[in-house]
Amino acid sequence: MKPLLVVESLRKVYHSRTGLFQQQTTVALDDVSFTVNEGQTLAVMGTNGSGKSTLAALISGAVAPTSGRLVFAGEELEAGNYRQRAQVIRMIFQDADASLNPHLTLGRQLEEPLLFNTKLNARQRHERIMKTLHQVGLLAEHMVFYPHMMSTGQKQRASIARAIILQPKLLVADEALATLDSSVRAQIINLLLDLQRDLKMSYIFISQSPEIVRHLADEVMIMKDGQVIEHGDVQDVFTAPKEQYTELMLMSELQRK
């Protein structure tokens, strides 16, 4: 498999003022390196504050790294160059309600990325929207739906549709299944697996659920305090974790089920 995304020595430091002449430094990510290959799913696990969401934000371009490099298909990703990322990396968020605009129909929300990032004409944009709705299991009439008119599962499908409308090569999902009930979650997992097979996408899947990671991922990366402490095949890490932190985290999450 060819490397798709190469992350090299990624570091993110936040500075916040605590007084007139004082500031606090928080290292959210510290010297993180890994590779995601074409067609591969990498899961990222860790407790709250481990750096998972910061990593997702850096990969998506929502925030700029303090240092380090991200190289996508041989091309270095530039901080702040949203157009460069928009074509190849897209995100799905945990809260579909927050990620969808309540004042726009789904059709309008799917058309916006096409207007800003492609040269497709009106007919071609309509065809792409129809095709994408079909791919995520929604109907043509959902084009005129506002978010409040859709069920929770439909809204998550709509978020996925918006994420894949530009036909990206990498999808970053930040706790995208965490708030779904078990039956809807199973449907979305199957949808994501089907999309990966059909569109030949790679995934970075942020999750605290061993069950979800076991179903979706090829490899898992365990994070603690902004650092990667364990990385390997999902089955190997889950069966024989090398770090006590990993073992305790897996046991804790499984006991919650």
Image: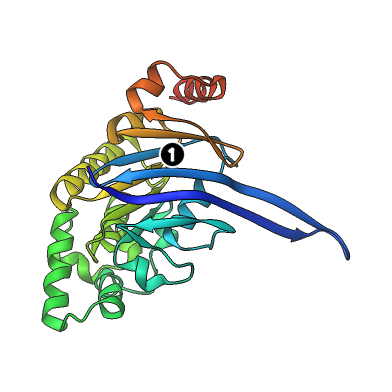
Residue 97 shown left or right of residue 170 in the figure: right
- Residue 163 in the image: x percent, y percent? 30, 60
Foreground of the two, 174 or 147: 174
- In this picture, residue 34 sits left or right of residue 47: left
Answer left or right for 25 relative to 8: right
Q: Residue at x 35, y 40 (%)?
A: 42
Q: State the image coordinates of residue 204 (x, y, percent, origin top left).
A: 36, 46
SS state under label 1 = strand
Q: Position of residue 74 (x, y in %)?
A: 32, 58
Between 222 and 35, the one nearer to me in the picture: 35
Residue at 57% x, 57% y: name it: 67
The N terminus sits in image quarter: top left
User: Which amino acid does the dot numbered 1 rest on?
Assistant: Val
Q: Vertical placement of 22 versus 174: above or below?
A: below
Q: Nearer the viewer, residue 210 or 16?
A: 16
| Quarter of the view holding residue 160 | bottom left
Badge 1 is on which residue?
Answer: 44
Q: Extreme top residue here?
A: 240
Q: Residue at x 33, y 45 (%)?
A: 36
Specify the quadrant that holds the C terminus: top left
- Farthest front residue? 74
Other residues around mark 1 within 10 Å, as few (<14) / some (14–19) / many (≥20):
many
Q: Quadrant of residue 19?
A: bottom right
- Is residue 179 visible in the rendered structure shown here? no
Q: Is residue 235 above or below residue 198?
A: above
Q: Residue at x 58, y 47 (%)?
A: 29
Is 49 or 98 nearer to us in this picture?
49
- Residue 226 locus on image (x, y percent): 58, 42
Q: Is residue 167 visible?
A: yes
